[in-house]
Image (cartoon, rainbow, N blue to C red):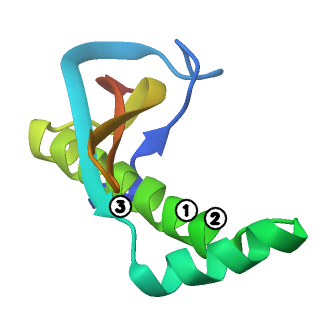
Amino acid sequence: MNARDIIVVTTETIQGREIVQVLGLVRGNTIRARHLGRDIGAFFKNMVGGEITEYTKMLAESREQALDRMREEAHSLGANAILTTRFATNSMMENAAELLAYGTAVVVK
């Protein structure tokens, strides 16, 4: 099994699976800064309204990177699933933010 095969859920259980070992908290994070080119595009989009696709894409990439890092940590502990997955964000400084994914690494059968 590799890290990409780990089951990741937001629930406390996985239907049809039994938790045989709880390995503890795992997390993955990324810190992203805004990009001048994206800011210019966002400025003009803000004037006419609508989705700011540059930021949507950046946030989606950040979520995937944080999830991948969380899976890697769980894999290193020997987990095959992560329960109660959550996301949190935090402003680190002007124009930079952290996206954190965290959950409970477990072994299920």
Image position, residue 100 (x, y; %):
33, 38
Quarter of the image for the N terminus: give it: bottom left
In this view, the mark in front (3 or 2): 2
- What amino acid is found at the position of numbered circle 1 in the picture? Ala
| Image quadrant assignment for residue 46 | bottom right
Q: Nearer the viewer, residue 13 or 60?
A: 60
User: Can you identify the residue that label 3 sits on?
Assistant: 65
SS for tag 3?
A: helix
Task: Name the residue tied to disc 2.
Answer: 56
Question: Which numbered marker is on residue 60?
Answer: 1
Q: Amino acid at mark 3?
A: Gln
Q: Position of residue 91 (x, y in %)?
A: 33, 38
Q: Picture quarter containing residue 77?
A: top left
Earlier sequence position, callout 3 versus callout 2: 2
Q: Is residue 32 visible?
A: yes
Locate residue 16: give its quadrant. Answer: top right
Element under disc 1? helix
